[in-house]
Image (cartoon, rainbow, N blue to C red):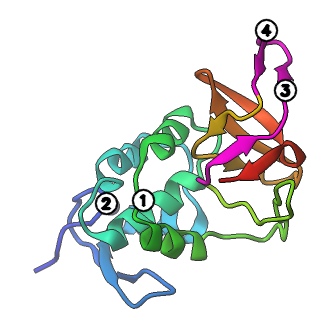
Amino acid sequence: MSQPCSLCQADAASDYTVAPRADEIALCPACLEGVEVGPSDDPHWHCLHDAIWSTTPAVQVVAWRLLHQLPAAPWARDLLDIAYLEDDVRGWAEAGLPDDSGIEHRDSNGSLLAQGDTVVLIKDLPVKGAGFTAKRGTSVRGISLVADNAEHIEGRVEGQRIVILTKFVKKS
Ligand SMILES: [Zn+2]
C-alpha cells in the first residue's frame, strides 16, 4: 500500500530523506521532481499553502525550500513572508538550500545575514519612486537576500517591498 504525498496528498509517494538530517517524508513523483530539479511556478505548488504549516518539521523544511526556489512567484514570496519556522527548523531548511552563488550578504557590522532575518535601518533612506523615507531605526522583518547581489536585500517597509543596501542595515 502506498502512502500519500506529504506535500500534495497524491498517491504513490516514495520516501525522501530531508538532508542534512535523517528524517524521511513521502513524496509523489511530481513533488520529488520539484525537490530534485527545482520547481517551476505551477499550480501544483499551491499545495505548499498547506504544507508550510505542517506540524511535521521535515515537511515544513521541504515546503520552505521549494518556496525559496520560486522567487518570481508573488504568492510564494507572500507565503514565505508569513511562514513561521522554529529557529532550529529554519536552520535545517537553510542548510539544504541550493547555493551555488557563493555570495554572502553582510550587514554594516560585517555580520552574516540570512534569509528571514530581521534588520534595523541605521540611517534614513529615501525610497525612490515610492515617495517616502524609510526612517532610521525601522525594523524590517523577514528580509530576502538578493541572490546575485551581495549588497542588496529586500524587505517590506510601510507595506512596500523595497530593495535595501546591506551597508545601511544592522542585524537585530
Ligand atoms: Zn506530491
Residue neighbourhood size for the residue with mark 3, other residues' Cα within 10 Å, grouped as few (<14), some (14–19), many (≥20): some
Image vertical order of residue 76 relative to residue 132, above or below: below
Could you say which quadrant of the image residue 130 lies in?
A: top right
Q: What residue type is labelled 3?
A: Leu
Residue underneath mark 2? 7
Could you say which quadrant of the image residue 77 lies in?
A: top right
**Alpha carbon of mark 2 to alpha carbon of mark 3: how far?**
41 Å
**Alpha carbon of mark 4 to alpha carbon of mark 1: how far?**
36 Å
Image coords of residue 156 (percent x, y): 63, 31
Direction from residue 145 to residue 123 in the image, left or right: right
Image coords of residue 142 (percent x, y): 58, 46
- Which one is in front in this view, the residue at disc 4 or the one at disc 1? 4
Mark 2 and mark 1 residues within 8 Å of each other at the beta carbon: yes
Residue underneath mark 4? 131
**Alpha carbon of mark 2 to alpha carbon of mark 4: how far?**
41 Å
Q: Residue at x 85, y 53 (%)?
A: 148
- Which one is in front in this view, the residue at disc 2 or the one at disc 3? 3
- Which one is in front in this view, the residue at disc 1 or the one at disc 3? 3
Q: Which amino acid does label 1 sit on?
A: Ala
Q: Which of marks 2 and 4 is nearer the N terminus?
A: 2
Residue neighbourhood size for the residue with mark 2, other residues' Cα within 10 Å, grouped as few (<14), some (14–19), many (≥20): many
Q: Give SS at disc 1.
A: helix
Residue 133: say if magenta: yes
Quadrant containing ligand 1: bottom left
Q: Which residue is drawn at 78% across and 71% down?
A: 100
Q: Give SS at disc 2.
A: loop
**Alpha carbon of mark 3 to alpha carbon of mark 4: how far?**
11 Å
Q: Give SS at disc 3.
A: strand
Q: Which residue is drawn at 54% across and 56% down?
A: 39
Q: Give the range drawn in magenta.
A: 116-135
Q: Is residue 96 visible?
A: no
Residue underneath mark 3? 125
